[in-house]
Amino acid sequence: MAPGSRDEAVEAVRQRTDIVELIGRYVKLKKTGGNFVGLCPFHAEKTPSFTVSPRKGFFHCFGCKASGDVFSFLMKMEGKDFGEALETLAERAGVELPRRGPGDSRRRELQSRLFEINEWAAKFYEETLWGPAGQRGREALAERGVPEATARAFRLGYAPGGWHALADRLRQHGAAPEDVDTLGLVLRSERGPRDLFRERLVFPILGLDGRVRGFGARRLNPEDTGPKYINSRQSPVFDKGELFFGLPQARAAVQDSGTVVVVEGYFDVITPAGVGVSNLLATCGTALSEGHARLLRRLTDRVVTLYDADPAGLKGSLRAAEVLIAGEMAPYMVYLPQGEDPDSYVRKAGGQAFRDLLAAARPAVEVLAEVLLQGSGSDPEKRSQAMTKLVPVLAACRDPIRQGNYFRFLADRCQVDERFWRQAVAQAGGQSGAGPRTSPVAAPASRSEASAPHPEEETLVALVVRFPRLLTLPNAAEAVPLLAQPALADLMQRLGQKEQSQGALLASLQDEELRSRLAARLIDEAFVEDSAEEAFLDCLRKLKARRLSQELSRLEQSLREARQAGDKEAERRLLLEKLERSRERDSLGVALPRGRT
Ligand SMILES: [Zn+2]
């Protein structure tokens, strides 16, 4: 196929990709009616709620609400970005992609060169570890009881002594010096190139797709005065805040167990893997970030944190709980005996004890409260200090029901009234159940309206996406201005302009939750052509009634102001207008919920 516009190419790839065949390579699918169902690859489940619609070209999970088209499936499954997913599918479908803007293709070319150099470096370190120069590295692994197979699975390596062994290797491969500079694996000095890592055990950090993104390295020479651990530099392929060590190795175990365990250190991943516990990931020398939380949410919804049992580990656990709760996940936690880390614990207590420990994970808030209070004894000053540390964690929670449960639990556990917690959280600027801090009248209605789900709007748009002929109805044109969600109004407008596949329209929605809700409506087989028109007109009436109600409350407000100002003329005009709008609304015959006049 000759390259046209990028949009055309995307559409062509979409049409030529069989979504059932693509997803079928990862998920066992069974045909039911016009759809296929299987166990969701994005959350742990025992009965299938993952549905694929070949006709509509998308998937939707009724359990975790994941949804999308062939591109989003591959992105989610393989951790690719859109461009990468497009490239992969275009190749399979035999569609030639048009050349993109110069900036974009330059970035992509740079990234692929950097990946290549990282791969050369990783191979070099691996070869060195298992070759004659790698003895020190092998000894360090043997001391920790890491089996060779495990070390190889994580692609561990050894950076030899000397100054420029890696630099030489990369030059032999023909790596461009400026690309090597970008990765920071070789530094420039007056005496020539100098390897960043020397006499260190090397941990390659891979993306979900298995490509080498960066490296961490541990000092092995006791005379080395440098830091114990160093990382390679942040680069266009390496962002520590969005990567974990052990991602591709943990993937299958995370999927099987439905749980991911987050630890701090490389050996906290490797040592348990050596005894068969493989669903662990390590942050690469940084605190858990929002980027990490997003990535975790794509893997599973059960996250257990297992940090070192020392003050730094406790601080990290608090921060992790805060980030995960803010990311709308329910974090679990295990706290080790004082002074231990997962690596030391496994070596001392063995694999089964470690498994038991993980199985006993409890909600993070519960464990944190216990650990903090234990450390402060009965001293009231220390106790209040300890409790204050939990406030940011609670304030991160945006679900009032869950937050209320935390408050009740902590009131009981710490023997401090619930009100203390509500107040402290309110002062910290979080949401608390203590009541809204602004009056409900003054609250900006427009903001919450834009983000909250609008069932009628979404049903209406879903109907038109499925049955485009609805657009030819005489009052279809009234719909667009009635849509409060800009993304939906925009979608409707595009629907009227040119024909697009359902998958394409859906994929164009940025808001993941909105996309998911819409997909759920589209995949619902209960929608049939016969009743579509009636359902469409019903939604339209409800939206009109809502619009009129909003106008009426605005008029009411103006009327009050006119009365206060004694402006008789305005009052008369407003009353007339109000009467007219009320009649209009009543004529729609839509019952309105109380309080929304
Ligand atoms: Zn799911």
Image: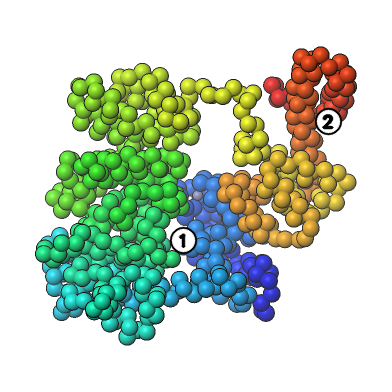
| Residue occupying the point 72% across, 47% down | 489
Q: How many numbered marks have been drawn onto this rendered protein structure?
A: 2
Is 480 positioned to the left or the right of 362 in the image?
Answer: right
Quarter of the image containing the C terminus? top right
Is 107 positioned to the left or the right of 193 in the image?
Answer: right
State whether residue 484 appears in this view.
Answer: yes
Is 61 positioned to the left or the right of 569 in the image?
Answer: left
Can you give x and y, in whole percent of width and height, for residue 150 in the image? 24, 65
| Residue occupying the point 81% across, 14% down | 566
Q: Is residue 400 above or below residue 246?
A: above
Q: Pointer 1: what residue? A: 79
State whether residue 124 appears in this view.
Answer: no
Can you give x and y, in whole percent of width and height, for residue 438 in the image? 56, 24
The residue nearer to you, when weighing 460 against 529, is 460
The residue nearer to you, when weighing 523 against 589, is 589
Can you give x and y, in whole percent of width and height, for residue 217 in the image? 25, 64
Q: Is mark 1 within 8 Å of ligand 1?
A: no
The residue nearer to you, when weighing 520 against 103, is 103
Kind of element beneath mark 1 = loop
Q: Dot 2: few (<14), some (14–19), or many (≥20) neighbours within 10 Å?
A: some
| Residue occupying the point 40% across, 72% down | 115
Q: Would you identify the image quadrant in which residue 160 lies?
A: bottom left
Q: Would you identify the image quadrant in which residue 69 lies?
A: bottom right
Task: Give the CA distance from mark 2 to mark 1.
Answer: 49 Å
Is 154 positioned to the left or the right of 11 in the image?
Answer: left
Q: Are marks 2 and 1 in contact (CB under 8 Å)?
A: no
Q: Earlier in the sequence, mark 2 or mark 1?
A: 1
Amino acid type, residue under disc 2 in the picture: Leu
Q: Pointer 2: what residue? A: 588
Quarter of the image containing the N terminus? bottom right
